[in-house]
Image (cartoon, rainbow, N blue to C red):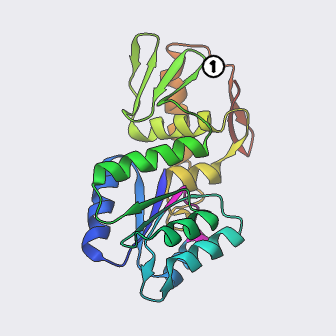
């Protein structure tokens, strides 16, 4: 999952980035409204952590601009403002949650996971597909009582395909959501296919994969 952190306080931005990167998220920090709008115009993010007091504008105006573009990423407003009116305005403009400074990083992690769960329409901490169980917070996959030894990238690919089950996921979508900044990647590379091929080999040790479909010249689909 890709997260954009919009925070101009350097120390707090570094703390959040370090904590979330250690939790398996891919993060990018931006420190102004202008930088943020340019970034999300180029690349896709699953979640934004948005400070309201930015040097070149109000974070609520940035949130409003994002929602006017029909951007579906989750947004958690993080701010020193604790007034009721600010919270109400944030929710009315499309924020998914609101966290007042100071806060514990563990609480931030819990809020992020809760928003992601709601975005994808599940209410438990695991996904199940054809006998496989994906433990979302522990980054583990099992088949029955047997562990399936996936790398971090293989886990991310499997999780993302299952979250989008019954829909074709293009190679570009996998690039943006799993590997991050698409502009930094070589579009001619076959690294996506390599990770998918390795993932399939490991899953096939436990289950016939007639439900794991390759859509020629497009991407992949997992059928429920």
Front residue (pair 54, 193): 54
Please tell me which residue is depicted at 65% across the width and 38% down the height of the picture.
164
Q: Is residue 47 magenta?
A: yes
Q: Looking at the rendering, in which quadrant would you find the C terminus? A: top right
**Image location (x, y in percent) of residue 82:** 40, 69
Q: Is residue 217 magenta?
A: no
Please tell me which residue is depicted at 57% across the width and 43% down the height of the picture.
118
| 207 vs 72: above or below | above
> Crowding near pointer 1: few (<14 within 10 Å), some, many (20+)?
some
**Image location (x, y in percent) of residue 69:** 71, 70
Front residue (pair 130, 211): 130
Front residue (pair 15, 93): 93
Q: Residue furthest front?
A: 84
**Image location (x, y in percent) of residue 55:** 42, 87
Query: Dot 1 corresponds to which residue?
Result: 209
Q: Residue furthest top?
A: 145
Relative horizontal placement of residue 20, taking residue 76 as reference (left or right): left
Q: Which residues are magenta?
A: 40-48
**Image location (x, y in percent) of residue 150:** 41, 30
Q: How many numbered circles are shown?
A: 1
Q: Secondary structure at mark 1?
A: loop
Rendered image quadrant of residue 187: bottom right
| 125 vs 152: above or below | above
| 168 vs 38: above or below | above
């Amino acid at each position: 999952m890709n997260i954009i952190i919009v925070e101009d306080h350097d120390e707090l931005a570094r703390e959040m980035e370090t904590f979330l990167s250690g939790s398996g998220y891919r993060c990018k920090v931006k420190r102004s409204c202008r930088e943020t709008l340019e970034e999300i115009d180029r690349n896709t993010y699953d979640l934004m952590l948005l400070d309201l007091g930015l040097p070149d504008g109000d974070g609520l105006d940035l949130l409003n601009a994002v929602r006017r573009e029909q951007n579906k990423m989750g947004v958690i407003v993080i701010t020193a403002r604790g007034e009721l009116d600010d919270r109400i305005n944030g929710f009315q403009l499309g924020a998914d949650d609101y966290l007042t400074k100071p806060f514990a990083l563990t609480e931030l992690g819990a809020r992020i996971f809760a928003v992601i769960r709601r975005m994808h329409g599940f209410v438990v901490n695991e996904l199940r597909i054809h006998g496989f169980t994906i433990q979302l917070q522990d980054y583990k996959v099992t088949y029955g009582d047997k562990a399936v030894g996936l790398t971090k990238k293989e886990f991310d690919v499997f999780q993302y395909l299952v979250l989008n089950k019954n829909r074709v996921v293009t190679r570009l979508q996998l690039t943006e959501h799993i590997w991050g900044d698409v502009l930094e990647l070589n579009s001619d590379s076959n690294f996506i296919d390599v990770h998918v091929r390795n993932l399939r080999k490991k899953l096939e040790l436990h289950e016939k994969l007639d439900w794991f479909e390759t859509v020629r010249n497009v991407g992949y689909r997992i059928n429920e």
